[in-house]
């Protein structure tokens, strides 16, 4: 009984300490803060292009016309193994579910 009481007291003490720490943290967050002034030295949000660099337009019309033109494709022999393998002694038959569906419908009403 004494150990149970000690355990309960330890849990309560831990809870109170945790609550006090949470309250202290919340008061620090909501308090006033003095921020230091920061001067912006380098803005890296846009690319830096030097003054002597010139950008030229590349003519892609020849490439695009070649892509859009008709091409003669060669035949490719493939070994397609994606079909499922079903043993020859396995037979799949259609199941008549009308009885089951009628039973479900009757229990629904």
Image (tube, helix red, strand yellow):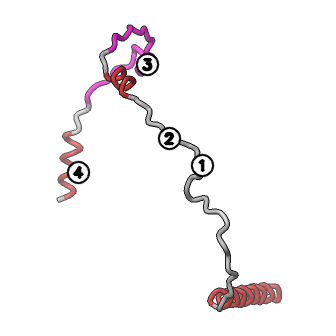
Q: Secondary structure at mark 3?
A: loop
Q: Main secondary structure of the magenta part?
A: loop
Question: Foreground mark, 4 or 1?
Answer: 1
Label 1 neighbourhood size at 10 Å, few (<14), some (14-19), many (20+)? few
Q: Residue at x 36, y 22 (%)?
A: 67
Disc 3 to disc 2, how far (Cα)?
59 Å
Question: Foreground mark, 2 or 4?
Answer: 2
Q: Tag on residue 85?
A: 3
Q: Residue at x 21, y 57 (%)?
A: 108
How far from the left and from the top, in percent, is residue 89?
Answer: 40, 15
The one nearer the camera, 48 or 3, is 48
Q: Which residue is mark 2?
A: 55
Q: Secondary structure at mark 4?
A: helix
Q: Which residue is mark 1?
A: 50
Q: Secondary structure at mark 2?
A: loop
Q: Give the quarter of the image for residue 100.
A: top left
Disc 4 to disc 1, how far (Cα)?
76 Å
Q: Earlier in the sequence, mark 3 or mark 4?
A: 3
Q: Earlier in the sequence, mark 3 or mark 2?
A: 2
Q: Tag on residue 104?
A: 4
How far from the left and from the top, in percent, is residue 82?
Answer: 43, 21
Disc 3 to disc 4, how far (Cα)?
35 Å
Disc 1 to disc 3, how far (Cα)?
64 Å
């Amino acid at each position: 009984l004494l150990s149970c009481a000690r355990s309960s007291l330890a849990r309560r003490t831990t809870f109170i300490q945790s609550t006090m720490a949470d309250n202290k943290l919340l008061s620090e967050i909501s308090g006033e803060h003095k921020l230091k002034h920061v001067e912006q030295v380098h803005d890296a949000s846009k690319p830096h292009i030097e003054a002597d660099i010139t950008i030229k337009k590349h003519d892609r019309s020849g490439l695009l016309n070649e892509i859009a033109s008709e091409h003669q494709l060669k035949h490719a022999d493939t070994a397609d193994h994606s079909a499922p393998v079903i043993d020859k002694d396995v037979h799949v038959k259609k199941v008549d579910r009308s009885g089951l569906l009628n039973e479900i419908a009757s229990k629904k009403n």
